[in-house]
Amino acid sequence: ARGRAAFDGIERADSITLDPHKGMFLPYGTGSLVVRDGARLREAHFVGAAYLQDFPPEDELPNFTEYSPELSRDFRGLRVWFPLVLHGVEAFREALDEKLDLARFLYEELSTIPELELPWEPELTVVPFRLRDGSDAADRQLLDLINASKRVVLSSTVVQDRFTIRACILSHRTHRDRVEECAQIVRRAVADVAGR
């Protein structure tokens, strides 16, 4: 529920893509699209063909092959429905709350490293950072050193034309001890790159 404020205004969107494989820790390929106007989505994807004539009329039962480029598909809804029934919504809220706490913890830990710049505070579970006075090459070297530990895997992006390292805390296996270790690995790697 804490992350809800980050979604203020979402009700004004024409469409929303959901990736439950992230925040709900579900298998890849478990995604959904919510649209305000289903008729427009149908217009965009409808394909008429002789072999598709045996479906009931749209007003009786939606033909989901007309709403997506996929004609055949897995029963992806089961991947969301079953864990919710098995564990309940609260279990997922608690797990996501833990990840939000861990992102905040990592942000605070990395904020104590003088050589690092953290461009913004985490809104959800991504913690960005880079060397305060570093070049993109130095930041790439820092990322390589961190990942060479083979204990954590961080990724990168480009923000305002600057190479930026990002820690994304979403694995259901990530808990406080792993994030503490990540902070220590980053601290050692920064010391190596900075020549301390």
Image (cartoon, rainbow, N blue to C red):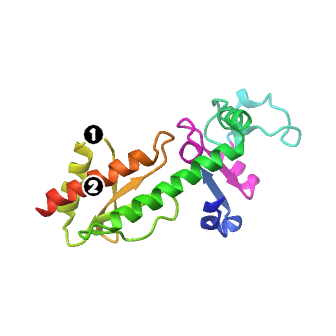
Total marks shown come to: 2
Tell which residue pokes out farthest to the right in this image: 60
Vertical comparison of 154 with 47: above or below: below
Q: Amino acid at mark 2?
A: Val
Q: Give the residue number, with chain letter if any, for mark 2.
A: 186
Quadrant placement of the N terminus: bottom right
Mark 1 is surrounded, within 10 Å at the Cα level, by few (under 14), some (14 to 19) or many (20 or more) other residues, namely: few
**Drawn side of residue 179 relative to residue 3, left or right:** left
Residue placed at 12% from the left, 63% from the top?
196
**Residue 162's spot in the image, x, y percent?**
29, 68
Q: Position of residue 85 (x, y in %)?
A: 74, 35
Q: Quadrant of residue 67?
A: top right
Quarter occupied by residue 193: bottom left
Which residue corresponds to the image point at 58% horizontal and 50% vertical from the top-left?
Answer: 96
Residue at x 58%, y 54% (from the top left corner): 97
Tag 1 residue: 150
Residue 30 drawn in magenta: yes
Seen from the viewer's position, the closer of residues 125 and 16 is 125
Query: Left of 79 or right of it: where is 132?
Result: left
Left/right placement of residue 105 relative to residue 10 reads left
**Mark nearer the N terminus (1 vs 2):** 1
Above or below 124: residue 179: above
Looking at the rendering, the stretch of residues picked out in magenta corresponds to 20-46
Q: CB under 8 Å between callouts 1 and 2? A: no
Residue type at tag 1: Lys
8 shown above or below 34 = below
Crowdedness of circle 2 by 10 Å Cα count: few (<14), some, many (20+)? many
